Image: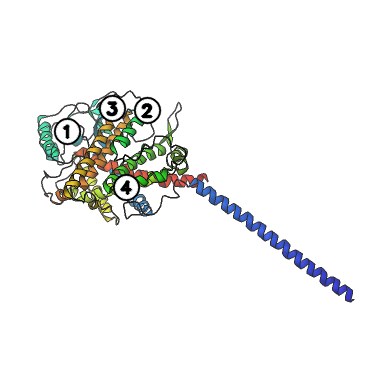
Amino acid sequence: MIKITITSAGLLIFLWVFGDFVLGWFHNSVKTDTYNQYSSREDDDSQDQSCFCHLTGVLDDCFCDIESIDVFNNLKIYPRIKQLTERDYFRYYRVNLRRPCPFWPDDSHCSIKDCQVQPCPESKIPVGIKSGNYNRYSQQANDITDIDCEQAQDLGAINSTLSNYSKEAFEDWARHDDAQDHFCELDDETSPDADYVDLLLNTERYTGYKGPSAWRVWNSIYEENCFKPRSVYRPLNPLVPPRGGDDDGEGFYNWLEGLCLEKRVFYRLISGLHSSINIHLCAEYLLDEGWGKSVWGPNVQEFRQRFDPAETKGEGTRRLKNLYFLYLIELRALSKVAPYFERAFVNLYTGDHQEDRTTKELLLHFFNDTKAFPMHFDEKSMFAGQKIEAKTLKEEFRLHFKNISRIMDCVGCSKCRLWGKLQTQGLGTALKILFSEKEIKNLPEHSPSKGFQLTRQEIVALINGFGRLSTSIHHLHHFRALLKEKR
């Protein structure tokens, strides 16, 4: 009986020890598998989100964080700016796409038919815009003979006839414009080569424009116009393939820290504009060009190629941060120019009273939103040194940017040239506003100011140019979601 009891107890002890071992092994096995699965998902997420993993926190040269901009833009600004750019006043842009390149002969050509600018329907251009709108906003300033737009072969509708009233008005206002600090080479609106283009019918998207011509344009912008130290030998042009070895993209940006704020800002503006353009090309990519209708949509692989740190040796995240920096610069300019448009004198005239009233109401609501943003860029920190040095640096800054606006006439693709000129003029107008604070504060309520004036073309470029930046940040949110879905 005792033997049986001892044997039973020994068997129970053995089973207890063995069972604990089995349970422990099973628990650890499950835990390890679970950890490996979680870790695998985390690695996949990190890989798929590599374009965004470092796109967070406070921006350089600013006291604003990216997350705040995302929320503010996507929930508040983007819906408002989308409404504005669809209004008649802002959808028609007068531009000369036939101006010759002043720097080299252009021998490029478009690779797909979608590169061309579509003609604008005659009936769509509002009377107030067609009838000599040079810098004028009121009905009285536009009450002249209506002129029909003529059809051009590949550039859209053209208004080639000017009344004497229009010529006198243009010459009068041009004298005021000549006295101002322009950051852009402005098109001559009286030129018979200047056409009205419907921006909604000629959206910015992939055109197939690339190769030596596109490389030469961006290379001239980066290498000849950005403030590059002599000690930096590596090309700034992102189109130059990254080299191997120690050419680390993130470390490459250390040279920026040695520049003064103004020169850093200049480079970041150009880089941000380039990034915004690239995002639009990735978001509106030609996915299928069949016998039927072309299919356009987001191309995740193309986006990764341009912004993934692994594909760009760490530079991709910097490029995206520069987009946010440019957004803040133009947002600040919009908040500062609000008093200019709040005057009763400015009507944004198109000839349709209800349309004009609604457009101005939307614009003023939009300006209220821009002014409510709590973390604006402080432009007072720029050109704030000794007066003579600051004045010289500001003039150098202005001339460099003005030269870039001239390079836009060297873009071989018609649609790329259209949007390049518009966005460059929009940024140039923003810079003009930022450095005209005193003139804007002293604006008369019921008459134009000779100290500060915006042409209709500058207004259209300013709003649409910022609309492009707002849309780019909205696209980033979409690409982030696509990358998560792909995981």
Q: Relative to residue 291, is residue 122 drawn left or right?
A: left
Within 10 Å of disc 1 (Cα), the crowding (few <14, some 14-19, many 20+) is many
Q: How far is the residue under mark 3 from the one under mark 2?
A: 24 Å
Front residue of 403/39: it is 403
**x, y (%) of residue 290?**
46, 27
**x, y (%) of residue 323?**
35, 45
Q: How far is the residue under mark 4 from the one under mark 1?
A: 51 Å
Task: Please give the residue where the numbered disc 4 appears in the rendered image.
Answer: 258
Q: Relative to residue 150, is residue 117 drawn left or right?
A: right
**Amino acid type, label 2:** Pro
- Of the two numbered discs 1 and 2 on the same chain, state the one appearing first in sequence: 1
Q: In this picture, is 381 found above or below 137?
A: below
Q: How far is the residue under mark 2 from the one under mark 4?
A: 32 Å
- Of the two numbered discs 2 and 4 on the same chain, state the one appearing first in sequence: 2
Front residue of 174/245: it is 245
Task: Please give the residue where the numbered disc 2 appears in the rendered image.
Answer: 212
Determine whether the residue tagged by mark 2 lies in a helix, strand or loop: helix
Within 10 Å of disc 4 (Cα), the crowding (few <14, some 14-19, many 20+) is few
**x, y (%) of residue 482?**
47, 44
Determine whether the residue tagged by mark 3 lies in a helix, strand or loop: loop
Q: Residue at x 15, y 50 (%)?
A: 438
**x, y (%) of residue 190?**
17, 30
Task: Please give the residue where the numbered disc 1 appears in the rendered image.
Answer: 131
